[in-house]
Image: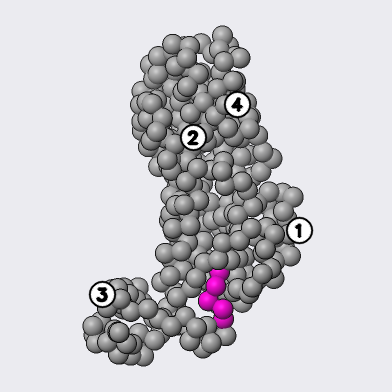
Amino acid sequence: MATLNDVAKRANVSKMTVSRVINHPEQVTDELKELVYEAMRELSYRPNAAAIALANNRTQIIKLLILEEMDTTEPYYMFLLTGIANELDKYAYSLQLLTHNNIQIGDSDGFIVCGTRKEDEDFIHGLDKPTVLFGQNDMGVDYIDSDNEESMARATEYAIEKGYETVVYIGIDVDEPFAHSREKGYTSVMRNHGKETHIYNLENRSRYSAAFIRENWDAFPKNTLFLCASDRLGLGVIREIKEHGGDIPNDYGIIGHDGVFLDQIAYPNLTTLKQSITEMGAACARMVLKKVKEEGKSQGNQLFETELKLGGTTR
């Protein structure tokens, strides 16, 4: 069984350096940390989490609370969990997944909370440990998210560049900052180009977007692109256009948002704005650990760019 001394020898550093990497990684350069982490991986060395917790007067546990229904997000949270857990593991922290009902069971050093809505504000401010939200918010709480406004603006520019005369925005029917930012990205570009906006907000399920296209088919001329605030909404649009014999992508284009799975099973594959979910999960972990270290000091917000991932639903 590998020891701290074995790791030090393999990495060609002192035992003190290895200890510092494990217990106080913020005090060590990235180059040294990578040397030690590589040695730990090669030797299958696992730090003693209980000893670390005792030495730092910490639990070495971060609680993850998901407040929305996970069955509406497909594998979205699988990627997020992977990013959070892998990053916490570097610092000998474990991740505890909770529901709203058991949030106070057991102790922890901090919280990462996902799927918050306006009605959760009092609950969030009542949490007694450093907290980071995954998702844009107006609660004054540090958060990680995609740059929703820039993301939709880029997609709208692309639609216009590809010659679609009409660009219709199908948003998610929630009164939340991320939804407003996505819509703002669309409207700002349309207005800059002197184009009329067409905005519809639906519940985030493909059957609703399919029904919307079916009930309003005659209102959408050829050379229209549907810019959807989620891939789920995009799937419904694709399905119903095909039912009506519409030519995708020549007569009708579709762009979704998320890019974590549904875009790949669509036929044709959905052009989408792919979010860096795993990387954002890792960023949530780093931010909450920094808040723990700095006794809850605010860390601000971090936005990630999305990637316009081209599929078969746009020219």
Where residue 72 appears, as percent x and y from the top left, is 57, 41
Badge 1 element: helix
Q: Which residue is mark 3?
A: 42
Near mark 1 (Cα within 10 A), the count class, few <14, some 14-19 or many ≥20, is few
Q: What amino acid type should be assigned to the residue bearing mark 3?
A: Glu
Badge 4 element: helix
Is there CB contact under 8 Å for labels 2 and 1? Answer: no
Q: Which residue is mark 1?
A: 122
Q: Which residue is mark 2?
A: 231
Query: Mark 2 or mark 4, which is nearer to you?
Result: 4
Q: Residue pushed farthest top?
A: 218
Task: Give the Cα distance between marks 3 and 4.
Answer: 51 Å
Checking the image for residue 208, the label placed there is 4
Where residue 239 appears, as percent x and y from the top left, is 47, 22
Where residue 33 appears, as percent x and y from the top left, is 34, 76
Residue range corresponding to the magenta coloring = 58-62
**Quadrant location of residue 278?**
bottom left
- For marks 1 and 4, the one nearer the N-term is 1
- For marks 2 and 4, the one nearer the N-term is 4
- Residue at 72% from the left image edge and 49% from the top image edge: 118
Task: Give the Cα distance between marks 2 and 1.
Answer: 31 Å
- For marks 2 and 1, the one nearer the N-term is 1
Judge from the rendering whether residue 4 lies leftward or rightward of residue 75; answer left or right.
left
- For marks 1 and 3, the one nearer the N-term is 3
